[in-house]
Image: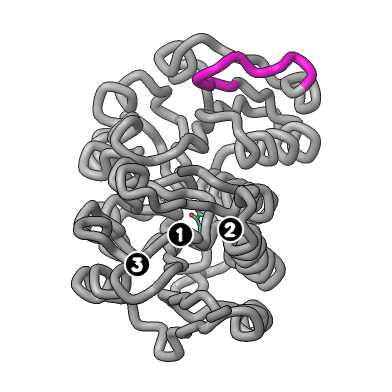
Amino acid sequence: MARAKVLVTRAWPAEVEARLAAGYDVTLNTSDTALTPAELVAAAADYDAILPTVTDRIGAEVFAGAPRLRILGNYGVGFSHIATDAARAAGVVVTNTPDVLSDCTADIAMTLILMAARRAGEGERLVRSGQWTGWRPTQLVGRKVSGAVLGIVGFGRIGQALARRAHHGFGMRVLVQNRSAVAPEVLAACGAEQVGTLDDLLPKVDVLSLHCPGGAANRHLIGAAALGRMKPDAILVNTARGEVVDEGALAEALAAGQIAAAGLDVYEAEPRVTPALMGMENVVLLPHLGSATHETRAAMGHRVVDNLDAFFAGKNPPDRVV
Ligand code: 8YV
């Protein structure tokens, strides 16, 4: 039987590329250049499987006509870059990679909390500039993280992993806002308390960390109105999806002192960042590093291939989202 034809849209960890090459008629992206929209449409006509990342906008046009494409094995847990309704209508299966990146993404959220609260980016820039004149009691004084109140929006696997770190490692009080009721034992495991609505949560927290899905439903969930309900000394952290935060409104809120600082790993139009944020000392900007460890990136790749193997063996892939 002919091997399934598989396209990998970006360069992946070598061990996973080798596993793919052993099982499939695979096309790798050795130059690691993002595909154009036209190349993605053409690929859907040529391949049984495409393995995209967050840098590939898989719009409805990819599913138009009668593509050869049968499965999209997304490399990543978030899939708001894929037009899932169009995939469903075309009978194309979509899978993602949950679990394996929860710890590392929670680590990056904690990194941003600490960097924003303790002014680590500013400090690093000061040292590198050669302008540091030595220790002073009033230099780069930030806010204490231990014991502060952390608000978590979206209490899935990553939100819970952050709550464990924050509560057990830093003695933070954790408040949670989630679409559905969270099981009492899940809350108890990290001393967390669920509040009713986002509006209830916002005025109560010293740090707000976002862990909900992206996409149309949560677009600009944190905009001018939400930012206006936060404390003036609060910190906003986003490791979820860029579209959850209205970047323009965030820049205005920071400039007006409505909130104190922000830490961002994701952006509305990656790799572009709202220019006003780029010049602000109280904003920490990371280049979408959430899952960027050797261990996790390999595990994500293997998770995609596990899904692919199940699909082409005629089984339901374990991480099927469409
Ligand atoms: C990935 C992420 O690296 O998994 C996700 O949703 O945001 C990142 O950790 C990225 O999406 C790769 O496609």
**Is 112 in front, or is 118?**
112
The image position of residue 297, as x and y in percent, is 62, 68
Of labels 1 and 2, earlier in sequence is 1
Left of 136 or right of it: where is 128? left
Q: Residue at x 41, y 75 (%)?
A: 9
For residue 44, above or below residue 197: below
Q: Give the CA separation, mark 1 to mark 2.
A: 8 Å
The image position of residue 164, as x and y in percent, is 74, 36
For residue 211, above or below residue 263: above
Amino acid found under the numbered disc labelled 2: Phe
Cβ atoms at labels 1 and 2 below 8 Å apart: yes
Of labels 3 and 2, earlier in sequence is 3
Local SS, label 2:
helix
Q: Which residue is mark 1?
A: 71
Left of 216 or right of it: where is 137? right
**Is 217 in front, or is 276?**
217
Task: Give neighbour class at mark 1: few <14, some 14-19, many 20+ (Cα, 10 Å).
Answer: many
Q: Give the CA separation, mark 3 to mark 1.
A: 10 Å
Local SS, label 1:
strand
Q: Residue at x 29, y 64 (%)?
A: 67
For residue 227, above or below residue 138: above
Magenta segment: 176-185
Local SS, label 3:
loop
- Using the image, tell me which numbered label, if any, was put on residue 137: none
Residue that lies at the very extreme toward the front in this rendered image = 1
Amino acid found under the numbered disc labelled 1: Ile
Q: Which residue is mark 3?
A: 68
- Using the image, tell me which numbered label, if any, was put on residue 311: 2
Amino acid found under the numbered disc labelled 3: Arg
